[in-house]
Amino acid sequence: MSDVYELAVSVDLRDELSETESAELRWHLGIGPQPERLSVVTEFPIVVEDEAGEPVIENEPRPLLAGSGAARRIGGVLGSALAGRADLPWKGWSLTSRQEIHPDDFDRVGELLCWLAERVHDTHRHGDDVVSIGHLRFHESLTPEVIEVANGRITWPA
């Protein structure tokens, strides 16, 4: 059995992303090159063996929402997009991403989603500054569950 989940994120971001933040976000979405310096999610620990065969932790950055093409387990297509909203009433950016993720990736993806939640348009906020940032569905389930960010912390469905 596989612990694969469908992650769906669709949010509108305020028009306050710096060029550096925008570049890193594009990299995470798989639509831009990796920036020289990461500031949104900075740690990507991975355990490898050194020359003596001992485990060591290295930092191996990778984009978090960059899956594309046919999904292996959840059906449909994976992908991410970022579009400017210059000609719309709410200026800023519209972001959509549909990905397959494993619980091992929840911490890193959660960091990125918390960062996004700080920048969403007010229409995504509800009571007590809670942000509905997306949906998560176990690949064998029919019903997705809401993912919320409150007080800078993400709540993953059980």
Image: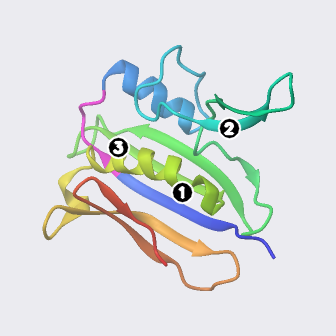
Type of residue at label 3? Trp
Between circles 1 and 3, the one closer to the viewer is 1
Which label was assigned to residue 115? 3
| Cα distance in 3D space between marks 1 and 3 | 14 Å
Is 117 rendered above or below residue 124? above
| Cα distance in 3D space between marks 3 and 2 | 22 Å
- Label 1 belongs to which residue? 106
Majority secondary structure in the magenta region: loop
Between circles 2 and 1, the one closer to the viewer is 2
Crowding at mark 1 (Cα within 10 Å: few <14, some 14-19, many 20+): some
Crowding at mark 2 (Cα within 10 Å: few <14, some 14-19, many 20+): few
| Badge 3 or badge 2: first in the primary sequence | 2
Is residue 13 toward the left or the right of residue 82 in the image?
left
Q: Residue 132: where, in percent of width, then height? A: 32, 65
Is 20 rendered above or below residue 58? above
Is residue 139 toward the left or the right of residue 18 in the image?
right
Q: Secondary structure at mark 1?
A: helix
Q: Residue 145: where, in percent of width, then height? A: 47, 78
Q: Residue 33: where, in percent of width, then height? A: 60, 21
Check whether the beta carbons of the residues at disc 3 and disc 2 lie within 8 A of each other.
no
Per the rendered image, the range of residues in magenta is: 12-17
Crowding at mark 3 (Cα within 10 Å: few <14, some 14-19, many 20+): some
Type of residue at label 1? Phe
Type of residue at label 2? Ile
Which label was assigned to residue 57? none
Is residue 102 toward the left or the right of residue 92 in the image?
right
Q: Going 14% across and 71% down the picture, which residue do you hit?
A: 127
Q: Secondary structure at mark 3?
A: helix
- Label 2 belongs to which residue? 46
| Badge 2 or badge 1: first in the primary sequence | 2
Between circles 3 and 2, the one closer to the viewer is 2
The colour scheme of the drawn protein is rainbow
